[in-house]
Image (cartoon, coloured by chain):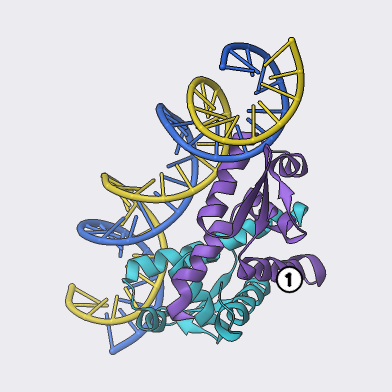
Chain colours: A cyan, B purple, C blue, D yellow
Amino acid sequence: MEPRAGEVASLLKTLAHPTRLMLVCTLVEGEYSVGRLEEALDIHQPNLSQQLTILRDAKIVETRREGKQIFYRLTAKRAAKVVSALYSIFCSDGEPS
Amino acid sequence: MEPRAGEVASLLKTLAHPTRLMLVCTLVEGEYSVGRLEEALDIHQPNLSQQLTILRDAKIVETRREGKQIFYRLTAKRAAKVVSALYSIFCSDGEPS
DNA sequence: TATACATTATATGCAATTACATAATGAGTG
DNA sequence: CACTCATTATGTAATTGCATATAATGTATA
């Protein structure tokens, strides 16, 4: 792990924010427009856009425009893998702590 | 994930730091004294102690005193699971990004 | 006991980063 | 142009990272 600690910590840092984590979780299911993400997460739009920018800069998501709308999807497979691991750790098996 | 997003993000935030990540990785192998951690990670002592304090506050590690030395070990199984998932994602299977 | 030393923790200060709100700007379409 | 959908700009309070300095705790020994 040592040589990758910086890289891994950097990805974790990007995910270590409730909104961004939920965004990535949501996008694991597929492509969403910004508007649909806004509904799904109940967050003010500029803030949402700022968090999406952070995910874009981290190469975790990428976009596609269709008319006025912009669709987001995951690009970083590793992020998806991390999220699904978190799912299985926190949301599946029972034992606490 | 939604209801746990805060809790999960909080754990990720604690791990999202190269030194702390390496500390947890190291402690997955077993108990270490502060001195041994210092050697293993090559970090200045007060800084190490500060990072250990953060891990202690987050209930990720706990301690035991033996004479002058203090031994640290993991307490949060979830942290260990997260780290081992990170291992398998970043250090085992090949495909990048 | 007093002293010296080893081991670890805490205090303090400050530069850098983060979170997020409000306001303004872009880009596409009718 | 007017409207919609989304991004960027800007300011600021709060948090983080980390260095230097100081303290606390345990042991050994004169």
Which quarter of the rendering shows the C terminus of chain B? bottom right
Number of numbered discs: 1
Amino acid residing under circle 1: Ile
Q: Which of these two is toward me, A81 or B11? A: B11
B84 left or right, relative to B5: right
Residue in the image at 60% along x and 76% along y: A86
Percent across and percent down for residue B35 are 72, 39
Residue at 76 percent across and 52 percent down: it is: A2
x and y percent of residue B80 in the render? Answer: 67, 66
Chain letter behind tag 1 = B
| Residue at image coords 38%, 79% | A41
Residue B25 coordinates in the image, percent (x, y): 72, 58
Answer few, some or many: residues within 10 Å of disc 1's Cα (few below 14, many 20 plus, some between 14 and 19).
Answer: many
Which is nearer the eye, C11 or D27?
D27
Above or below for A64 versus A60 = below
Q: Is label 1 in a helix, a strand or a loop?
A: helix
Judging depth in this view, the residue of C27 and B53 nearest the camera is B53
Q: Which residue is mark 1?
A: B89
Locate residue A16, reporting x and y percent.
Answer: 52, 63
For residue A77, say whether it is visible. yes
Question: Eyeballing the image, is A3 above or below D6?
Answer: above
- Any part of residue A57 in sight: no
Up-down: is C27 above or below B51?
A: below
Q: Quadrant of residue B77?
A: bottom right
> For residue C28, which quarter of the picture?
bottom left
Q: Residue at x 70, y 67 (%)?
A: B86
